[in-house]
Amino acid sequence: MICNIGQYGEDFEAAKKKALGIGASKVFVEDVREEFIKSFVFPAIQFNGIYEDRYQMGTSLARYPIAKRAIDIAKREGAVAVGHGATGKGNDQVRFELSFLALAPHLKCIVPWRDPKFFERFAGRQDLIEFAKASGIPVTQTKKETIFN
C-alpha cells in the first residue's frame, strides 16, 4: 500500500507498477489527502503544533492516517498481519505500531528492521539499495540518498 498524503513529486503509478513487477499480488494506492488535511493538518495549525519550537509536525501527523488506511485494507482483505518498513532509528516505527495496535490488536505486526536475521543482512538502507540493484529491482537512489522511491 502507498498513500498519497500530498507529497510532492511521487509517481504513484510507477510505484504500483514496480511493486507488481517485483512480486506483489495486489497494490493499493490510497488517497488520504482530504482526511490528512481536515483531521490532522488543520487541527495542528490551530494548536500551533510545532516540535521542539521549530519543526512542523507533518511527518509524524501523517503516520496515523496511513496506518488507519492499512488497517482498513487489512480488515477488508482478511489479512492476519500488517507491516511497515520504518527503521529502528526513528519514531515512525512507534507511530505505526501503536496505531496498528490501537486499531486492530488482533493483527500481527511484521517489522523487518527489528528481525535479527533481516538486520544482520541489511544493516541500513544502503545495504537494501545494493541488494535491490544486484537483484534487478530498479532503484533511483544514490549513496547520498536514503529514501526509497
Image (cartoon, rainbow, N blue to C red):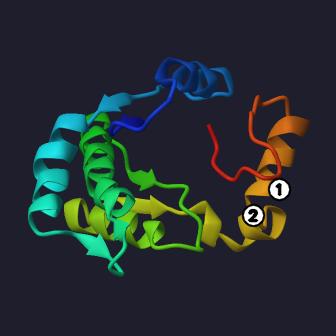
Q: Residue at x 33, y 57 (%)?
A: 58
The residue wearing badge 2 is 124
Q: Nearer the viewer, residue 75 or 98?
A: 98
Q: Which residue is at the far right?
A: 134
| 38 relative to 149 in the view: left or right | left
The residue wearing badge 1 is 127
Residue 86 on image: x %, y %: 53, 61
Q: Amino acid at mark 2?
A: Gly
Q: Residue at x 41, y 38 (%)?
A: 7
In the picture shown, does residue 85 fall above or below 91? above
Q: Quadrant of residue 94?
A: bottom left
Label 2 Cα crowd, 10 Å radius (few <14 / some 14-19 / many 20+): some
In the picture shown, does residue 23 fall above or below 87? above
Q: Amino acid at mark 1?
A: Asp
Whether pointer 2 and pointer 1 mark residues with C-beta atoms closer than 8 Å, the reply is yes
Tell me the quarter of the image containing the C terminus.
top right
Q: Nearer the viewer, residue 108 or 100?
A: 100
Q: Quadrant of residue 95?
A: bottom left
Label 1 Cα crowd, 10 Å radius (few <14 / some 14-19 / many 20+): some
Tell me the quarter of the image containing the N terminus.
top left
Q: Label 2: state its secondary structure.
A: loop
In the picture shown, does residue 78 fall above or below 63? above
Q: Residue at x 78, y 53 (%)?
A: 144
The circle on residue 58 is: none
Residue 64 on image: x %, y %: 27, 57
Q: Which residue is at the far front?
A: 54
| CA–CA distance in space, label 2 to label 1 | 6 Å
Q: Nearer the viewer, residue 14 or 120?
A: 14
Q: Label 1: state its secondary structure.
A: helix
